[in-house]
């Protein structure tokens, strides 16, 4: 998923920011690069000093060329969780 992609360099930036931030608090921070399409709002990561510099957008054309046509109404494409969303609750 291009929305959740994270480069190794951005992972390092996130770890360093988390370990060196003077105050972390109880903030939810998502490990992802600065992708144009995302699942989450990660603006809270800035308060620990995390600023991703990479993006999955450089791979978009290549990935989409190999991908089947996406049905934008399909829950697998529409919601976070992919195939697990289509299966429904576990018994």
Image (tube, grey):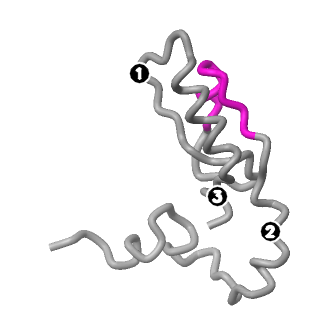
Viewer-side residue, 11 vs 62: 11
Q: Secondary structure at mark 3?
A: loop
Residue at 77% over, 79% down: 64
Viewer-side residue, 26 vs 85: 26
List the single residue furthest toward the left: 91
Residues at circles 2 and 3 in contact by the CB criterion of under 8 Å:
yes
Q: Secondary structure at mark 1?
A: loop
Viewer-side residue, 52 vs 78: 52
Residue at 62% over, 47% down: 32
* Quadrant into which the N terminus falls: bottom right
Seen in the picture, residue 12 relative to 61 is either above or below; the reply is: above
Which mark, by number, is residue 26? 1
Q: Earlier in the sequence, mark 1 or mark 3?
A: 3
Disc 3 marks which residue? Answer: 5
Residue at 49% over, 73% down: 75
- Residue 59 is situated, as x and y percent measured from the top left of the image, at 80, 68
Q: Secondary structure at mark 2?
A: helix
Q: Earlier in the sequence, mark 2 or mark 3?
A: 3
Seen in the picture, residue 88 relative to 8 is either above or below; the reply is: below
Q: Quadrant of residue 40?
A: top right
Residue at 84% over, 63% down: 58
* Marks 2/1: CA–CA distance: 33 Å
Disc 2 marks which residue? Answer: 59
- Residue 71 is situated, as x and y percent measured from the top left of the image, at 63, 82
Q: Give the extent of the magenta segment.
A: 42-52
């Amino acid at each position: 998923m291009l929305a959740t992609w994270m480069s190794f360099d951005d992972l390092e930036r996130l770890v360093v920011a988390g370990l060196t931030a003077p105050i972390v608090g109880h903030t939810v921070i998502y490990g992802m690069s600065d992708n144009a399409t995302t699942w989450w709002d990660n603006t809270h990561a800035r308060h620990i000093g995390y600023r991703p510099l990479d993006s999955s957008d450089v791979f978009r054309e290549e990935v989409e060329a190999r991908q089947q046509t996406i049905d934008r109404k399909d829950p697998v494409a529409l919601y976070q969780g992919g195939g697990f969303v289509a299966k429904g609750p576990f018994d």
